Image: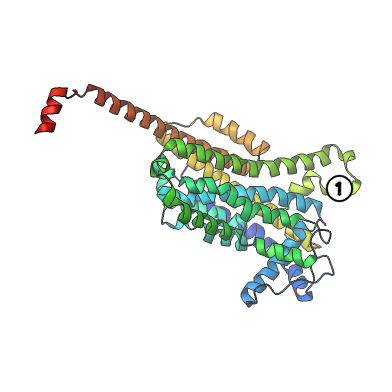
């Protein structure tokens, strides 16, 4: 699927239009600027924190992000909060795939290995812009695309074993802290600080994994590091973690929104309307609503994040399909298109597009590792056969040889 390497940059370009240009035109950025000038949190009279590191460039960036993200988790808009919960799981799982690519053997010391740079770009320029762009580079530059093999996709086992814990510490726990209500659990100032601390989480992930590798790799067994059986076991844990991260938040969001749509009597009138499926996931098309002016930062941020999640997640899924198809054509000589389409539809609808992407890359790796395991079995059997066929040295000859 060579066309995907052209589609992904186009998705990044579309993100600029659907997210950045539309947010400028609908008045979101103007409302955020007004909040910053007034030094108050959007929708409140509480003070907006403007000093973090004492460095103007850093402080101004974190102030802007603080005003923007405040509305996501302040609880004032349930539909936005539910969409953000869904987004958080997808983002974490997608980033597991990015991190895996950055550590794969075939991608070492290439631009693909610099996941932290793309992480900063994702935080500042959106997931929808940065992630398709990263995976387009992968399709253009990675040797894995043209020559998939167990050796090419290998990741150090110490990294694979550390990924779930590192993501929990660097991403999931800070994300959960942002959900804590104010002022019951966190003061307004403390929550803004939590939001600021959360921002560079891709850098935390990169630094922690690099530290783990530097400290633990000298003690790791080289034999185990090259064993496809060991790699398969470690990969399975990582993919299960990523699949759960994406699917649990997606399923929870969809079930809750569909419940509010189909059985509204379960909710109060306010929440039945706010959690309605269309309110949470319904898109506002920029070409259809070109004259729209949002009435609040909350409304604008919701539209912003809807497009951010959709474009970024579609990009991840298209890349995964491309890698899956490439490996199956190289190894099996064919692709079962009917079963693949059925699988994609079911997974995307029931577990979410990013969970579907995780599943495809998981299956791709399983295929390549299974081939390597079978090759090792055959090689070991041949070595045993050769040893059994080689003539044994008679005992007397051994004795004469030792005496001489």
- Residue furthest toward the left? 404
Q: Would you say 387 lies left or right of 132 here?
A: left
Which residue lies under the disc numbered 1? 271
Q: Nearer the viewer, residue 305 or 52?
A: 52
Q: Nearer the viewer, residue 136 or 95?
A: 95
SS class of the residue under badge 1? helix
Quadrant into which the C terminus falls: top left
394 to 60, vertically: above or below: above
Q: Would you say 7 lies left or right of 179 here?
A: left
- Residue furthest toward the front? 403
151 to 133, vertically: above or below: above
Q: Nearer the viewer, residue 109 or 7?
A: 109
Residue located at (90% from left, 39% from top):
265
Residue 149 visible in rendering: no
Residue 230 picture location, percent across and down: 46, 38
Colour convention:
rainbow
Residue 223 picture location, percent across and down: 38, 41
């Amino acid at each position: 699927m060579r066309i995907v390497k052209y589609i992904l940059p186009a998705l990044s370009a579309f993100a600029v239009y659907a997210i950045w240009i539309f947010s400028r035109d609908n008045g979101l950025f103007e409302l955020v600027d007004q909040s910053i000038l007034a030094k108050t949190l959007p929708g409140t009279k509480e003070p907006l924190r403007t000093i973090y590191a004492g460095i103007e460039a850093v402080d101004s960036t974190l102030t802007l992000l603080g005003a923007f993200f405040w509305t996501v988790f302040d609880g004032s808009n349930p539909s936005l909060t539910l969409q953000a919960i869904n987004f958080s799981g997808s983002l974490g799982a997608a980033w597991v795939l990015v991190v895996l690519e950055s550590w794969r053997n075939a991608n070492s010391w290439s631009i693909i290995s610099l996941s932290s740079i793309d992480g900063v770009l994702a935080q500042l320029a959106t997931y929808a812009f940065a992630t398709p762009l990263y995976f387009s580079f992968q399709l253009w530059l990675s040797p894995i695309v043209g020559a998939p093999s167990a050796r090419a996709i290998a990741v150090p086992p110490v990294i694979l074993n550390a990924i779930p814990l590192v993501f929990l510490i660097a991403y999931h726990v800070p994300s959960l802290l942002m959900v804590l209500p104010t002022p019951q659990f966190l003061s307004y100032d403390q929550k803004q600080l939590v939001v600021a601390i959360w921002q560079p989480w891709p850098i935390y992930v990169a630094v922690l994994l690099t530290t783990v590798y530097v400290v633990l790799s000298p003690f790791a067994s080289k034999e185990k590091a090259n064993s496809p059986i060991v790699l398969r076991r470690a990969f399975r844990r990582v993919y299960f973690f990523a699949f759960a991260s994406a699917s649990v938040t997606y399923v929870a969001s969809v079930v809750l929104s569909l419940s509010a749509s189909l059985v509204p009597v379960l909710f109060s009138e306010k929440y039945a309307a706010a959690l309605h499926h269309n309110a949470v996931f319904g898109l506002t098309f920029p070409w259809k609503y070109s004259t729209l002016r949002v009435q609040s930062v909350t409304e604008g941020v919701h539209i912003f994040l809807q497009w951010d999640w959709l474009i970024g997640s579609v990009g991840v899924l298209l890349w995964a399909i491309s890698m899956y198809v490439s490996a199956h054509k190289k190894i099996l000589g064919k692709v079962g298109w009917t079963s693949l389409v059925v699988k994609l539809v079911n997974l995307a609808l029931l577990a979410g597009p990013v969970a579907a992407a995780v599943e495809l890359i998981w299956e791709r790796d399983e295929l390549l590792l299974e081939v390597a395991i079978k090759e090792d079995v055959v090689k070991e059997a041949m070595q045993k056969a050769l040893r059994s066929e080689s003539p044994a040295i008679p005992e007397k000859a051994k004795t004469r040889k030792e005496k001489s």
